[in-house]
């Protein structure tokens, strides 16, 4: 009887030890945008697929709306230092720490979805090299529809931009403001409404999707699709946190991430079309950009990209040269 009891107890302890070894890992994931935004919804599908495919060994807990308290420019270092195991990192917001990462957020650099994807693919090896120095790598990326400007008055030519008090979200917006006479202010989305009501802002630059998220029609009247940027978001993971995962879990996550990247890039165009319809249904006036206005904007873009490339270094210039060669653009 005693022998049987010993065997049973040994088995119990063995099972408990095995269960402890298979205990799930939990990652808290910083998300910049509201839970209903298509990037956040994509992250939810990613987390759900990972949890299901790993049998719960890896659980990714989402924190949308920047609810963990980190701002965009802080995210590269927050992941590097292990404050965040995983985070959605907009490339244009972290150029203070790594200028070359802002390549995909340069003004008027791409005109369609093919060019957006091409530019990112050309930049990927350099991005990976830079991110390794920041103790992280990208699981998957996603892209925004091109950004336009929301205003209280119609914008039909470059001169109409002068004097606007505009919310922007990255260095590109600040540079564009300086070049066109806009008083540009970089601030989180959550601060836009109070700033507009206080008279500190009368416009903002963002995508059709974010315009819907923010219910822009409640404070602004016009959306002008100048298509200044179609920036890339990276879902980055801290290398130390990654290396703690069993190899089979890593392989599963990478496979899911590969599918997610294609899925998210394909979604951007559909989301843009749907969001523009919602803007119009709510009274937002969407004015097309004339050929003359487009020419003026492109001239500004060429100048600003050259200035940025001079500061960003040789890797950035090499990628740009190859991109221009393939697309025939400048």
Image (cartoon, rainbow, N blue to C red):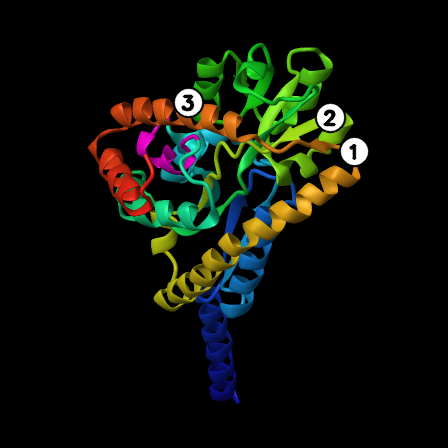
Q: Are marks 1 and 2 in contact (CB under 8 Å)?
A: yes
Q: Could you say which is closer to the camera, residue 210 or residue 269?
A: 269
Q: Which residue is at a point 30% across and 25% down the rendered structure image?
A: 306
Q: Is residue 67 left or right of residue 114?
A: right
Q: Name which residue lies at 55% across and 57% down.
A: 47
Q: Decide: marks 1, 3 in contact (CB < 8 A)?
A: no
Residue lying furthest left: 314
Q: Is residue 228 visible?
A: yes
Between the C-alphas of marks 2 and 3, the distance is 25 Å
Q: Magenta segment range?
A: 96-107
The Cα–Cα distance between marks 1 and 2, rounded to whole angstroms, is 7 Å
Residue beneath disc 2: 221
User: Residue at horizontal 26%, vertical 40%?
Assistant: 319
How far from the left and from the top, in percent, is residue 165? 60, 14
Precedes in sequence: disc 2 or disc 3: 2
Residue 102: % across, % down: 38, 33
| Place of residue 295 in the rendered image (x, y in percent of width and height, measured from the top left) | 46, 27
Which mark, by number, is residue 300? 3
Quadrant of the snapshot with the C terminus: top left
In the image, which disc is placed on residue 283?
1
Q: Secondary structure at mark 1?
A: loop
Residue 96 x/y as whole percent: 37, 25
Q: Residues within 10 Å of mark 3 (few under 14, many from 20)?
A: some
């Amino acid at each position: 009887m005693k022998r049987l009891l010993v065997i049973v107890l040994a088995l119990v302890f063995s099972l408990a030890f095995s269960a402890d070894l298979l205990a799930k890992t939990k990652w808290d994931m910083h998300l910049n945008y509201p839970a209903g935004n298509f990037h956040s919804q994509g992250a939810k599908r990613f987390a759900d697929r990972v949890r299901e495919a790993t049998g719960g060994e890896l659980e990714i807990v989402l924190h949308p709306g920047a609810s963990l308290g980190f701002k965009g420019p802080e995210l590269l270092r927050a992941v590097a230092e292990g404050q965040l195991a995983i985070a959605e990192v907009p490339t244009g917001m972290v150029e203070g720490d790594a200028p070359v990462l802002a390549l995909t957020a340069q003004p008027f650099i791409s005109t369609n979805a093919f060019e957006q994807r091409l530019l990112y693919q050309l930049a990927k090896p350099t991005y990976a090299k830079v991110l390794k120095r920041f103790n992280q790598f990208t699981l998957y990326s996603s892209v925004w529809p091109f950004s336009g400007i929301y205003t209280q008055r119609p914008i039909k030519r470059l001169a109409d931009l002068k004097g606007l008090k505009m919310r922007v979200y990255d260095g590109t917006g600040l540079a564009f403001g300086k070049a066109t006479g806009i008083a540009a202010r970089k601030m989180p989305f959550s601060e836009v409404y109070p700033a507009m009501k206080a008279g500190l802002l009368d416009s903002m630059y963002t995508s059709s999707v974010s315009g819907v998220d923010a219910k822009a029609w409640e404070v602004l009247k016009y959306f002008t699709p100048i298509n200044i940027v179609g920036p890339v978001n990276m879902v980055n993971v801290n290398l130390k946190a990654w290396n703690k995962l069993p190899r089979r879990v890593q392989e599963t996550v990478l496979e899911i991430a590969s599918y997610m990247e294609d899925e998210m890039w394909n979604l951007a165009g559909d989301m843009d079309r749907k969001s523009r319809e919602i803007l119009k249904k709510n009274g937002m006036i969407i004015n097309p950009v004339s050929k003359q206005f487009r020419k003026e904007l492109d001239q500004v873009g060429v100048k600003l990209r050259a200035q940025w490339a001079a500061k960003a270094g040789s890797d950035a210039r090499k990628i740009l040269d190859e991109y221009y060669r393939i697309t025939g653009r400048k």
